Structure formats: C-alpha cells, structure tokens
Image: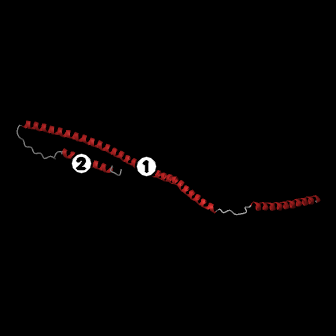
Amino acid sequence: MQHLSDRLASYLDKVRALEEANADLEVKICDWYQRQRPSEIKDCSPYFKTIEDLRHKIIAATIENAQPILQIDNARLAADDFRTNYEHELALRQTVEAGVNGLCRVLDELTLARTDLEMQMEGLKEELAYLRKNHEEEMLALRGQTGGEVNVEMDAAPGVDLSCILNEMRNQYEQMAKHNHRDAGPGS
C-alpha cells in the first residue's frame, strides 16, 4: 500500500510540474503574439474600389457565361417543339395515307362493279338486238304465210321494257356510287 501511495505522490508531482510548464508556455505564447501583432492598423479603403470593380467584372462574366446556356436551353426547347410537330405531322400523314388506301380499295370495288354492270348492260343490249331480230324474222315469216292482211288483237300483258330495266340499273349503279363516295368521304 505504501508503494501505491508513493506512486500516487510521484504522479501528482509530475502533474503539478506539467501544469507549471503549461502555464509557462501560455505566457510565452501570449508574449510571442504580442510581438508579432502589427503595431499599426493598415488602411484598406483603396482596395474597396478594386474589389468593387472585380465584383462587377465577375457579375458581367457570369451573365456572359449564362448567355450560351440560355441559348442552349432555347435550342433544346425549339428542338423539342420541332420533334413534337414532326410526330404530329407524321401521325397525320399516316392517317391520310390509310384513308387514301381505303379509298383506293373502294375505287377498285367500284371499278369492278361498274365493269360488271357494263358487261351486264352489253349482254342485255345483245339480247335485245337478238330479240328484235328474231321478232322481225318472225313477223316477216308470219306476213309471208298469211299472204293477206290480218289484224290480230291480243289481250296479253305488255312485254318487258329492257330500256326501262337498263335505266333502273344505271340509276342503282349511280346511287351505289354516291353512297360509296359518301361512305369514303373526308372523315375516313
């Protein structure tokens, strides 16, 4: 126990010695700062004008550097607008092309229908010509057989008027063409 007390006393002596050395060093540091401090305060007012000029130059340079950034942003916005317009016009073009393709199909169908109707009309004209020729031949043959004049009255239904049928077919074709044209109109 005595040994521990001696060690503690030795330790406390060292702490006191270090505190004294520390106080000594603090006094020396304060003296050194006192000696290093300038004896007079300098007047910095001439530098304020230079500082203010440099501040204005910095602001002007900042504004000048911001101009290209602003121009880049404006160019980017313009490019975005052009891209949007292009995409809109492309969609519009594709819509119009689809409409034109649809109208081409309608036109092809109408052309086929017209060709078919013209062929039917030609067939009916040939049939009409054939029937007239047969009628003429039969009339001539009947006139030749009777030798005299015979007045025959028939109570029969009137014959089919082929020109009326052809006109009706033509009207139906024109109505179909108007209807198809209306269906394929500007909204398609």
In the rendered structure, the answer to whether residue 32 lies left or right of residue 112 reads right
Label 1 with label 2: CB-CB less than 8 Å:
no
Identify the residue at image location x=26%, y=48%: 174
Which label number is shown at residue 121? Answer: none
Question: What type is the residue that disc 2 sits on?
Answer: Asn
Seen as rendered, the residue at the extreme left is 148
Q: Is residue 152 left or right of residue 37?
A: left
Q: Which residue is mark 1?
A: 86
52 and 187: which is toward the camera = 52
Residue 91 image offset from top left, x and y in percent: 42, 49
Which quadrant of the view contains residue 33? Answer: bottom right
Q: Is residue 67 left or right of residue 138?
A: right
Residue located farthest toward the right when viewing the structure as drawn: 2
Foreground tag (1 vs 2):
1
Mark 2, other Cα within 10 Å: few <14 / some 14–19 / many ≥20: few
Residue picked out by circle 2 = 171
**Number of other residues with Cα within 10 Å of mark 1, as a class: few under 14, some 14 to 19, many 20 or more:** few
Element marked by disc 1: helix
What percent of the width, then of the height, locates residue 180?
Answer: 31, 48
